[in-house]
Amino acid sequence: MLKQLLTALFVIYTALGAFASQVDTVYVTSKSMNKAIPNLVILPDSYTEQKESYPVLYLLHGAGGDHTTWATNVSAIKEYADSYNMIIVCPDGDRTSWYFDSPIDREMRYETYVSKELIGVIDTKYNTASNRESRAITGLSMGGHGAFYLAFRHQDVWGAAGSMSGGLDFRPFPENWDLPKRLGDYAKSPDHWEENTVINMVHLLKGGGLKLIFDCGVNDFFYDGNKRMHQKLMERNIAHDYIERPGSHNWGYWANAIQYQLMYFDAFFKS
């Protein structure tokens, strides 16, 4: 009897595993930085190479994280890929790259990497819908800034962008998160800081072509920058979804926030 029960459980487990999302670690060689970079790729349980093409969400980690951070801290992200029938790609941002091409460090070229090199590999290796209408990007903290930064500057690549607790204006933090290593000392290189903080890039948004959603907890140290970004977009009559609610800069907040953003991106893909 016990043997039959164990056999039945094994069959059920095997059947369930056959329909679980697939998680790949893909190393992409960056020519711009001359190194191989790991990326976590989550495929929905429906994924095949023959059926319809899949939309892709690029999901960026925060400072100090890596390509595994989202899946480790929000395990439900694999279920979300299944539920929304989308591919989720989590790049490695080298802990504190801020996802731009550093004007002072040629070894930090993560704008080029994510917006060109990585996307090219993902669209070649997987059955993606390789157009801006089927591609979105979001992230938390440093990754929230990175998502807006990349999408604002490459609106031909991404059709929608989000930010969760994003460092949308990092100028009030001139000593934090290796920013001086990426941009130089604020007092000596103010232009680098002004040119690379995303709150100063609103002028790039024209015609309402890029769909935007961002949120921040009212107890977050980035809250003021997010609220000012919202006000700036309102002044310029740029459509966007903005949410503020109780919360701080932590995984409890982001595990909740990603659910709202996934619904937003799913609606965008289906539109």
Image (cartoon, rainbow, N blue to C red):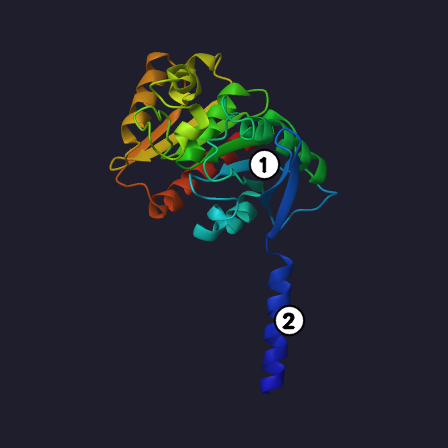
- Where residue 97 appears, as percent x and y from the top left, is 48, 33
Foreground mark, 2 or 1, reads 1
Q: In this picture, is 78 found above or below 51?
A: below
Ranked by sequence position, the earlier of labels 2 and 1 is 2
Task: Look at label 1 and name its amino acid.
Answer: Val
Q: Which of 108 and 208 is in front in this view?
A: 108
Q: Which of 127 and 41 is in front in this view?
A: 41
Q: Is residue 271 visible?
A: no
| Disc 2 crowd, CA 10 A, few/some/many (<14, 14-19, 20+) | few
- Where residue 74 appears, as percent x and y from the top left, is 44, 50
Q: In this picture, is 251 found above or below 181?
A: below
View extreme (bottom): residue: 1
The residue at the point 63 percent across, 37 percent down is 35
Tag shown at residue 11: 2
The residue at the point 66 percent across, 47 percent down is 47
**Quadrant showing the N terminus:** bottom right
* Residue 128 placement: quadrant: top right
The residues bearing labels 2 and 1 have C-alpha atoms spaced at a distance of 32 Å
The residue at the point 56 percent across, 28 percent down is 109
Q: Name the residue under label 1.
A: 56
The residue at the point 44 percent across, 20 percent down is 196
Q: Which of 187 and 39 is in front in this view?
A: 187
Considering the numbered disc 2 on the image, is that residue within a helix, a strand or a loop?
helix
Q: Nearer the viewer, residue 65 or 208?
A: 65
In the rendered view, does 56 fall on the left or right side of 184? Answer: right
| Disc 1 crowd, CA 10 A, few/some/many (<14, 14-19, 20+) | many
Considering the numbered disc 1 on the image, is that residue within a helix, a strand or a loop?
strand
